[in-house]
C-alpha cells in the first residue's frame, strides 16, 4: 500500500482543524457532521446493549453477539483511534410511494447507502489531506495519521458516537434524531488516529413525554425498554431468512395499510421531529421511474429478472429475491 503522506489541514495549535473538516463535509453534501473524542463507552450504554443481547431481543441477528467487548472500544476498529468524525446524509424522498402501492423503507428507494457513504467519506479524508487508510495487514507508517471508514461495516456503536459528536440524540424509536432535520438519515464514520483542535459535545434529548413512535408500531416491537427484533417488521421482512412461522406471518399480516414489503418506517413517520424532513438531493438516492410505477399486481408477478433489474446496486438485495417474494406472498394469504 502506498503511504505517501500529505500534510492534513491544520490551524494554529495542535490537532486537525475541526472547522475545516466540517466545511469540507458541507461541500461534499453531508447534512450533519460532528466530531467526538474517543473515550470509554459509558456504563449505561454497555449494560443496555448487553441486556438486549442477553434477553434475545436481537432475534436471529447472531452477528450482533460477535465482538462483544470490542464494540465498546474503537481501538478494536482502528488501533490508536483518538477521534471519530460522525457524518449524516439525508435520504427522505421527494416522491414517496402512494398509499395504494406496496411500501419500502425510504432508505431503500435508491442505491445502497453503504456504497454511497463510504465513497463520500473517503472523499472527505482526501480533502483534509489524509492518504493512509488502515488495513489490518499493513504496518503503520511512522509519523502518519491513519484513518478508517465505517458504515455498518465494523463493530461500532454508530448512534452512540453520533450522539457524542453532538449531531443528534437517540430517540425513543432508537433512531438518531438530528435537530431541524429529523431521523431519515444514514450514518457513517471517519475514524482517525489524530486529535482535532475542537470536540463537540452531546446535545439534550428532545423526545420529552412523546410516545407517538411506540403507539405507531403495529406489532408492539417498540417499547420504552427497547426494540424486540423478533416482532419488528424491518427485521422480519429483511433480516429473517427462510419461511415465516405461523406467528411471524401473522405479525406481517396484522400491519395496517399501506403494507410494507421491505422494512418499515412507521415509527419514523409518526415522529413529530420529521415534520422538518426535506427531500434529499443526493443523485444516488433517487428512485427509478420503474420502481415508482410498480403496482401491487406488478409486484405479485415479480420475476427474478425483474428483481435483478429493479434492484441492481440497491440495499433491497439484503432480503434477496426469495425473501421479497415471501413477504409479498404472505400478504396475499
Image (cartoon, rainbow, N blue to C red):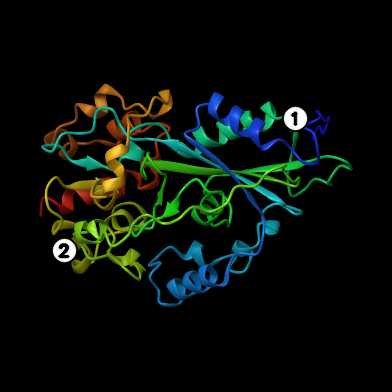
Circle 1 crowding by C-alpha within 10 Å: few under 14, some 14–19, many from 20: some
Comes first in the chain, label 2 or label 1: 1
Cα distance in 3D space between marks 2 and 1: 56 Å
Q: In x, y percent, where is residue 7? A: 81, 30
Q: In x, y percent, where is residue 283? A: 41, 23
Q: In x, y percent, where is residue 73? A: 65, 62
Residue in the picture at 39% in, 24% down:
281
The residue indicated by pointer 1 is 9
Pick the residue in front: 227 or 255: 227
SS state under label 2: helix
Residue in the picture at 16% in, 63% down:
250
Q: In x, y percent, where is residue 308? A: 35, 33
Residue 181 left/right relative to 30: left
Mark in front: 2 vs 1: 1
Q: Quadrant of residue 107?
A: top left
Residue in the picture at 74% in, 50% down:
136
Q: Which mark is residue 250?
A: 2
SS state under label 1: loop
Amino acid at each position: 500500500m502506498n503511504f505517501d503522506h500529505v500534510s492534513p489541514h491544520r490551524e494554529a495549535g495542535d490537532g486537525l482543524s475541526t472547522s475545516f473538516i466540517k466545511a469540507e463535509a458541507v461541500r461534499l453534501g453531508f447534512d450533519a457532521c460532528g466530531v467526538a473524542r474517543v473515550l470509554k463507552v459509558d456504563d449505561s450504554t454497555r449494560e443496555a446493549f448487553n441486556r438486549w443481547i442477553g434477553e434475545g431481543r436481537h432475534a436471529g441477528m447472531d452477528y450482533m453477539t460477535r465482538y462483544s467487548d470490542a464494540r465498546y472500544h474503537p481501538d478494536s476498529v482502528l488501533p490508536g483511534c483518538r477521534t471519530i468524525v460522525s457524518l449524516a446524509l439525508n435520504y427522505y424522498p421527494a416522491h414517496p410511494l402512494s398509499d395504494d402501492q406496496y411500501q419500502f423503507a425510504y432508505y431503500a428507494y435508491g442505491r445502497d447507502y453503504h456504497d454511497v457513504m463510504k465513497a463520500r467519506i473517503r472523499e472527505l479524508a482526501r480533502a483534509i489531506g489524509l492518504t493512509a487508510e488502515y488495513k489490518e495487514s499493513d504496518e503503520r507508517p511512522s509519523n502518519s495519521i491513519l484513518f478508517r471508514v465505517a458504515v455498518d461495516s465494523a463493530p461500532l456503536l454508530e448512534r452512540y458516537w453520533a450522539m457524542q459528536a453532538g449531531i443528534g440524540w437517540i430517540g425513543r424509536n432508537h433512531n438518531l434524531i438530528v435537530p431541524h432535520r429529523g431521523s431519515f438519515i444514514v450514518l457513517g464514520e471517519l475514524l482517525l488516529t489524530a486529535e482535532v483542535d475542537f470536540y463537540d459535545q452531546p446535545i439534550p434529548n428532545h423526545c420529552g413525554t412523546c410516545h407517538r413512535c411506540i403507539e405507531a408500531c403495529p406489532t408492539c416491537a417498540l417499547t420504552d425498554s427497547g426494540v424486540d427484533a423478533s416482532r419488528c417488521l424491518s427485521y422480519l421482512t429483511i433480516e429473517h431468512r427462510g419461511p415465516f412461522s405461523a406467528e411471524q406471518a401473522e405479525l406481517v399480516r396484522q400491519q395496517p395499510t399501506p403494507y410494507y414489503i421491505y422494512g418499515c418506517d412507521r415509527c419514523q413517520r409518526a415522529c413529530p421531529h420529521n415534520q422538518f424532513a426535506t427531500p434529499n438531493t443526493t443523485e444516488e438516492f433517487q428512485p427509478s421511474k420503474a420502481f415508482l410505477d410498480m403496482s401491487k399486481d406488478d409486484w405479485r408477478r415479480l420475476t427474478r429478472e425483474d428483481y435483478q433489474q429493479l434492484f441492481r446496486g440497491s440495499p433491497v438485495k439484503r432480503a434477496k429475491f426469495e425473501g421479497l417474494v415471501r413477504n409479498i406472498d404472505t400478504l396475499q394469504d
